[in-house]
Amino acid sequence: MNVVEASGLGKRYGRTWALRECTLEIPAGRVTALVGPNGAGKSTLLNLAVGLAAPSAGQVTVLGGRRAGSPAALDGIAFVAQDTPVYKGLSVADMVYVARSLNRRFDRPYAKARLDELGIPLKRRAGKLSGGQQAQLALTLALARRPRLLVLDEPVAMLDPIARHDFMATVLAAAATDGVSVLLSSHVLTELERVASYLILLSRGQVRLAGAVDDLLATHGQASLEELAMAYLRETTLEVPR
Amino acid sequence: MTAPATRARPDSEGEARLRPVPWRRMAGVAWRQHRIALAAVAVLLGALSVLLWVLGSPVHHDWAAAVACHPASSAACQELAATFNGSWNLMSVVSSLLQLVPALIGAFVGAPVLARELETGTFRYAWTQGFGRCRWALAKLVGLAVVLAAAGAAFGLLVSWCFQPYFAAGNQNLGLYGNSQLVGLFSLREVTFPAWTLAAFAVGALAGMLIRRVVPAIAATLAVYTGLAIAAAAFLREHYLAPLVTSNPNVPGTAWIIGQWWTKDGRFAFADNPPGNIVTQFCNFPPPGAGGPGAGQKGGTAAGSFPTLPQCLGPHGYLQWTSYQPATRFWPFQWIEGGWLLALSALLIAATIGLVHRRAA
C-alpha cells in the first residue's frame, strides 16, 4: 500500500505554481524524508496530502486510495504542522481533552504516560511550555491518535539540538514499534540521515528525485544522504539558468 | 524513549461507513476554547442586569406612585408625574449605551472564532483532526450562536421590564417609531436583542474568516454592524409592512408617520407641508413670527381659535394624506426584524463555513 499517491499534482497560489506536475508514490511502513530548499514546495505537498489545501491540478490520495482530506483520510493521518501550533491559552490537560474529543480514536493512557515521561505537567498552560515541550506535546497528541501515517512539516526547525534529538527519537520509536508510516519535511539534512529510509527531493516545485535511500545511494554513488541531496540540489539549481 | 505499550492498530473497517465523531463532543471543545469570551459576556450582561435592576426598580416605583395618585391634577400628583418623567433623562442615556451591547458581544465572541485559529496557525491542527473542518466550524458557530442568542433573549426581557413604565405611559407603541425617544429601544427587546447579537456574531465570524486577524476583524465587525443598524433604523424598518394611508387628519398619536402629502381635487398637489403662498391665501393665520400655530398638521388641540391646515384648506379641494405604521404593528415588526436578522445570520454562517471548506492553506 502507498500512504501517499500523487499524479500530475499541482498547486497554484495566484500566478505562481508552488508545486507542479508532481507524480509520486510513497510506500507504507517507511520514514520518508521530503527534502528541498526553502520554497521548494514541501509544505504545499504536505498540506495537499493532509487535505488542508485543495489541488489546482491533478490529484492526491492517501492511505491506499482515500481522497486527501476525506473523513476516512483524516481519521488515519495525524499532522503536526510547521512550528507545532498549540492552543496557547489551554492547559496541557485541555489540549489532551480537545484532541480526544475531535477524534474517533485516542489513546489517552498513552498520551498521559508520555507527557509524564517528558515531564510536561498537565496543568501547565500550553503557551508556557518551552518550544521543545510544545513540539513534544503536539507530537504526543498526534501519536495518541494511533495514526497510520504521521505527517510532520519541518518538525525540528525551531528546536535546539537536544530537543531535536528527543523529538526525532520519539518519531523513530513510533515508526519502529508501531509501524506508523512517517512523512516528514526538513531542510536540516543531518537530522534525516539517521531516520529516513525513503527520500523525496523537491526543488522549485518539482520532484527531482524519489526512491529508497539505499537504492539512491547505490545508484548515485554517494556516501550519505546529505551528500546525495546536496549534489542534487546544486545540480538542479545550476540546471535552471537564472 | 520507550515506545507506548498499548498497540491499538487502526481497524480496517469499511472506510465509507466510518462513523463520524459525535457532534456533542464539540460542546466541551468549544467551551474550553471560548470560556474566557463567554465568561466575559456573562460578566458584562450580569453587571448590566444588576444596573437595570437598580435603575429600573425606582422607575417602576415612581410610575406606580404617579398612576395611583388622585386626583391627577393635584399639585402632589403633578410632582409625582414630573419625578417619573424626569427619570427618563438618565434612562435615555442607559438605553443609548445598551445599543453597543449586541455589537460588542457579537464582535468579541464572533470575530476571534476563526480569526484566532488562522492568525496563530492552529487551524492546521484543528482542521486535520478526525472531526472534519466543516463540521468543526458548523458545530462551533451554531453552538456559540445559540448560547449568545439565549443570553440575549433573557437580557432583552430584562430591558423590556426595565423600560416598561415608559411604554405604559402611552409610549409603548412609539417604541417602534422614529418620532419617539424610545425608538432606540426597538432593537433591544426580547426578540430583536438576540437577533442583533446573532447578526453581529455572524458578521464577526465571516469577517474573521476573511481578514484572518483578530483585531482588524473585530474592528470590521463593529463597522459593518453599525452600518447595518443604521440602515435598518433609517431605511428598512418603515418598509416591513405596507403603511396604511388615510385622509383622516386625526392619525393616532402613537402611530409612526411615514409620509404626508396633499392632493387637490384627487390629484397630487405637494408633499409634506403646503407652500407658504397657499397657506397665506387660504388660511387666516397671523403673520409669521407672531407666534401662530405654524404648520400644525396634526389637528392642534392648542390651536384654539386658529383653524388647522386641513380645516382651512379642505374647503378649497385640498386633502391631506398620511401614510403611517399603526402602533399595533409593534410585535409584527419585532418578529419581522428578528426574522430577517436570523436569516441573514444563517446566510453569513453558511458563507463562513463555505469559506472554511474552500480555504486553501
Image (cartoon, helix red, strand yellow):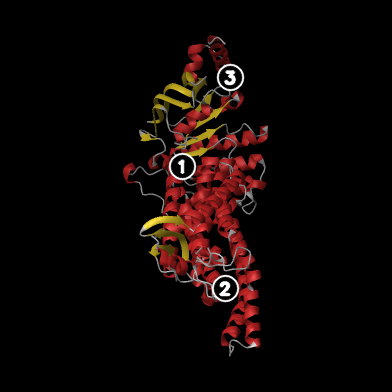
* Residue at 58%, 34% in the rendered image: A155
- Which numbered disc covers residue B162? 2
Count of numbered circles on the image:
3
Position of residue B185 measured from the top left corner of the image (x, y, whole percent): 54, 65
The nearer-to-camera label among 3 and 1 is 1
Q: Mark 2 lies on which chain?
A: B
The reply to whether residue B35 is visible in this rendering is yes
**Can you tell which mark lies on residue A140?**
none
* Label 1 element class: helix
Q: Left of A31 or right of it: where is B70? A: right
Left or right: B80 as drawn, with respect to B264: right
Q: Does residue A197 lie above or below B286 as drawn?
A: above
Residue type beneath disc 3 = Glu
Residue position for label 3: A226
How many residues crowd mark 1 within 10 Å: few (<14), some (14–19), many (20+)?
many
What percent of the width, then of the height, locates residue A96? 54, 50
Q: Residues within 10 Å of mark 2 (few under 14, many from 20)?
A: many
Quarter of image, res A190: top right
Is label 2 in a helix, a strand or a loop?
A: helix
Same-subunit check for callouts 3 and 2:
no
Chain letter for mark 1, please. B
What residue type is disc 1 on?
Val
Q: Mark 1 points at which residue?
A: B356
Pointer 3 chain: A
**Residue B40 shown left or right of residue A149 in the figure:** right
Classify B28 as above or below A67: below
Q: In which quarter of the image is residue A49?
A: top left
* Front one among B152 and A51: B152
